[in-house]
Structures are given as C-alpha cells and as structure tokens.
C-alpha cells in the first residue's frame, strides 16, 4: 500500500490482505484503521462518512442489472433546488420542494403493505404551535380541479369546525356494503341508528322539526307517555 503524509495528517491507500483483499483508502498510516472507502472483490463499495456530489445538476444513478428488470433510478437536484427520484430519468416518482418541504408523488402511496398487527397512521399537522387548516382533497374530474370531495378541519382552535364537503350534483352517499348499521353519536352517546328499514333514536326524548310550515314532534319513545304529533 501507499502512505501519504503531511504535517497535519496521514492517509494510506492499497489492498488490505488481512480483510479479504479489499481495496481501501484509510485515514491512517495503516489500512484497516479509520477506513474511509472500502471496495471488495465483488465491486461493493462502503463509505465511512458523508458523500457529496457537487455540480450544477448533481446526479446519482442506481442501476439494477438483474436480468429482465432493466430499471435505472436516478436521484437528482435540479437548478430550481427541487429534489427528484426518477425512474429511467423520465418519470419523477417523487419530487420534494426545497423551500416548502412539499412532496409530490407521481403514483399510488401505500402505507403498511403486508402488515400483520402493526399500527399505521397518516397524520396531518402534527406538532402544531398555532391554529391552521388541515384537509384532504380528492379530485376525480376536470371541472372541480381543486377538489371534488374535501375533508377539512378548521383553524378555529380546539373547538374548530370539521367539514366533509361534496361538490357537484351527483349523489353524496353514505353506505355500508354489508348488513352493518349506521350509528350517529354525540358526546360518546348513541343518538340515532339506521339498521335495515328501521331508524331508532335510543336516547332521544323529543324530536322536533318544521317542514314547509308543517310541524312534527316525537315524545319519549322509551316511556309510557310515548307520543307522536303532526300538525
């Protein structure tokens, strides 16, 4: 091996026969101590420390040489500062904006694939220090390009409103595919249940309404004074 020495540092480069004949660059007078780069006889490289790519358009290619795959992945940073993970340099699978931290995925995102009992979650707004909107937008048409269905949490603090908003004149459906009931609760108490062809109000003592001037009221359904009045 070769030793390079200055007044401030000593480095060595060569083949380490004591470590499976790996080629090494070491931050020491002998190989095997403070190795900064190791390349084994299979071509695998190990870096001990940071690797910096410096250029106007730095690129790092990952090529799968397995027969039949032919997939090349590229990690890059563009002149606008955005970071890209691209397949074959054509499809930007992931784009990250360097100023906002916003990430854009070109395809599906799966969380917890093939899990057994592990807990998985999607959190929006974790660690907030102030009040702000959090929402999920679904876009499925070329008319409402901002959102066709939105699930939103308002910015009014601990008692902010929550909205599920549907746009367009198509049906907004709440359904169960099997024979499960639909249950409505407030303060953790069941107030209404829809099951089969029956709607029940387990804890309601009175239900009032006004439809085009016609009034109706339902008394305590669970008491001996149950009544129904329509006028």
Image (spheres, rainbow, N blue to C red):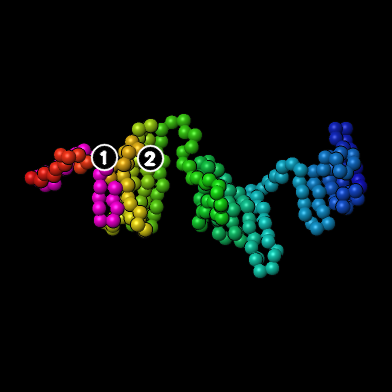
Could you say where residue 106 lies in the image, as x and y percent from the top left? 51, 56
* Mark 2, secondary structure of its residue: strand
Quadrant of the image containing the C terminus: top left
Query: Looking at the image, which is closer to me, 96 or 221?
Result: 221
How many numbered callouts? 2
Q: Residue at x 88, y 44 (%)?
A: 31
Residue 153 marker: 2
Residue 201 falls left or right of residue 83 = left
Query: Looking at the image, which is closer to me, 213 or 51?
Result: 213
* Mark 1, secondary structure of its residue: loop
Q: Residue at x 53, y 45 (%)?
A: 119
Could you say where residue 50 lies in the image, as x and y percent from the top left? 72, 42
Residue 203 marker: 1
Answer few, some or many: residues within 10 Å of disc 2's Cα (few below 14, many 20 plus, some between 14 and 19).
Answer: some
Q: Residue at x 52, y 54 (%)?
A: 110
Question: Is residue 87 depicted above or below 103 in this figure?
Answer: below
Residue 35 falls left or right of residue 114 = right
Question: Is residue 159 depicted above or below 102 in this figure?
Answer: above
Query: Could you give the CA–CA distance between mark 1 and mark 2, rounded to whole angstroms?
Result: 28 Å
| Segment tinted magenta in the rendering | 193-218
Does the stretch in magenta take in 210?
Answer: yes
Could you say where residue 117 lies in the image, as x and y percent from the top left? 55, 49
Farthest residue toward the bottom?
Answer: 68
């Amino acid at each position: 091996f070769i030793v390079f020495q200055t007044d401030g540092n000593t480095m060595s480069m060569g083949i380490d026969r004591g470590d499976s004949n790996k080629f090494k660059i070491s931050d020491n007078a002998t190989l095997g101590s403070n190795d900064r780069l190791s390349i084994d006889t299979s071509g695998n490289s190990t870096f001990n420390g940071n690797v910096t790519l410096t250029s106007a358009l730095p690129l790092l290619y990952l090529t799968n040489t397995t027969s039949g795959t032919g997939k090349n992945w590229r990690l890059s940073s563009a002149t606008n500062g955005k970071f890209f993970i691209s397949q074959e340099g054509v499809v930007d699978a992931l784009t990250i904006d360097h100023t906002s931290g916003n990430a854009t995925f070109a395809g599906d995102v799966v969380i917890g694939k093939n899990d057994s009992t592990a807990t998985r979650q999607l959190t929006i707004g974790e660690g907030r220090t102030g009040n702000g909107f959090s929402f999920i937008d679904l876009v499925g048409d070329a008319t409402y390009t901002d959102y066709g269905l939105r699930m939103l949490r308002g910015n009014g603090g601990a008692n902010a409103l929550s909205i599920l908003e549907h746009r367009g004149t198509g049906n907004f459906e709440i359904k169960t595919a099997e024979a499960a009931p639909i249950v409505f609760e407030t303060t953790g108490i069941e107030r209404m249940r829809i099951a089969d062809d029956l709607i029940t109000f387990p804890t309601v003592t009175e239900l009032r309404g006004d439809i085009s001037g016609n009034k109706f009221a339902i008394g305590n359904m669970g008491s001996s004074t149950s009544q129904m009045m329509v006028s």
